[in-house]
Image (tube, rainbow, N blue to C red):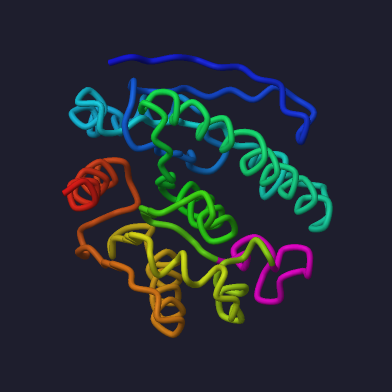
């Protein structure tokens, strides 16, 4: 498997950001780590191993990016507005710097054929992947979100600050009527999953709410609730990513 490491300065964040790329061609996949996770976490936790057959066959090319959660959602001592301002900068890095670079490299690696991205992640990575998918549908046609939360309530309570509204999918999707966003959603493949076992209670609740919101907007999505033995853990996420990727790749 071809693996490359990158350390690139981000003008949006005013710091260097690291990521790795796995594979030589195929559908581009953008992976977000769990809370405060690093770009190498996905490999270390066995997820790249699960996807290895597709990567080695040239059907997937995977980019694993870094988070800055310790500067945003987990930045103790900063106000909500300060944390969300930094998260806006992270969103700018992803959407204006990293994704265009992925698209350019992917097009070159696939004989000039441009493909939209698949976004994926587990736990807080599922939130990040869903948020960028819904905020920037021009770049994506697929989402696999595993054991995620889809609102800002976990960080700011029942009454979220105005500065977090457009990063809280359950809030902004509920009021969304713009067909420029809804049509791409409806033409995408969306897979959302949570277990019903240990440490999945909040994820199960918010996954159900997301299912209801997407249904109300006539957005087709596969939303699954795995068994009561299925916990918030990499052991299950490895099974789930392979299950949904097999469906997506057909």
Residue drawn at (38%, 31%) of the image? 62
Q: Residue furthest front?
A: 112
Q: Is residue 192 above or below residue 54?
A: below
Query: Which of 87/233 is in front?
Result: 87
Let me know if residue 74 is in the magenta part: no
Rendered-image quadrant of the N terminus: top left
The magenta region covers 151-165
Q: Position of residue 80 (x, y in %)?
A: 79, 58
In the rendered structure, the answer to whether residue 161 lies left or right of residue 224 reads right
How many marks on residues? 0
Q: Is residue 160 magenta?
A: yes
**Picture quadrant of residue 172:** bottom right
Lateral position of residue 225 relative to residue 87, left or right:
left
> Which is more toward the observer, 13 or 107?
107
Residue 179, given in percent of the width and then of the height, sits at 55, 75
Question: Residue 119: x and y, percent?
Answer: 43, 47
- Tell which of 217 and 16 is nearer to you: 217
Residue displayed at 42% across by 64% down: 203
Q: Nearer the viewer, residue 184 or 233?
A: 184
Which residue occupies 74% across, 50% down? 88
In the image, what residue occupies the spot 35% across and 61% down?
190
């Amino acid at each position: 498997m071809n693996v490359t490491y990158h350390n690139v300065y981000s003008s949006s964040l005013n710091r260097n950001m690291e990521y790795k790329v796995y594979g030589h061609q195929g559908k581009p996949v953008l992976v977000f780590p769990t809370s405060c996770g690093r770009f190498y976490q996905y490999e270390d936790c066995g997820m790249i191993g699960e996807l290895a057959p597709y990567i080695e066959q040239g059907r997937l090319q995977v980019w694993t990016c870094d988070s800055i959660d310790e500067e945003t959602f987990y930045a103790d001592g900063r106000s909500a507005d300060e944390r969300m301002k930094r998260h806006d900068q992270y969103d700018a890095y992803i959407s204006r710097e990293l994704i265009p670079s992925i698209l350019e490299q992917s097009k070159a690696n696939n004989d000039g054929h441009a493909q939209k991205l698949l976004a994926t992640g587990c736990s807080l990575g599922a939130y990040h992947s869903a948020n960028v998918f819904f905020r920037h549908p021009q770049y994506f046609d697929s989402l696999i979100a595993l054991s995620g939360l889809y609102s800002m309530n976990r960080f700011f309570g029942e009454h979220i600050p105005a500065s977090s509204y457009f990063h809280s999918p359950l809030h902004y999707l509920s009021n969304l009527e713009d067909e420029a966003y809804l049509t791409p959603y409806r033409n995408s493949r969306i897979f959302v999953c949570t277990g019903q076992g240990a440490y999945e209670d909040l994820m199960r609740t918010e996954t159900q709410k997301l299912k209801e919101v997407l249904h109300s907007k006539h957005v087709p999505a596969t939303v699954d609730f795995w068994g009561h033995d299925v916990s918030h853990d990499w052991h299950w996420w490895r099974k789930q990513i392979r299950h949904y990727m097999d469906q997506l790749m057909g």
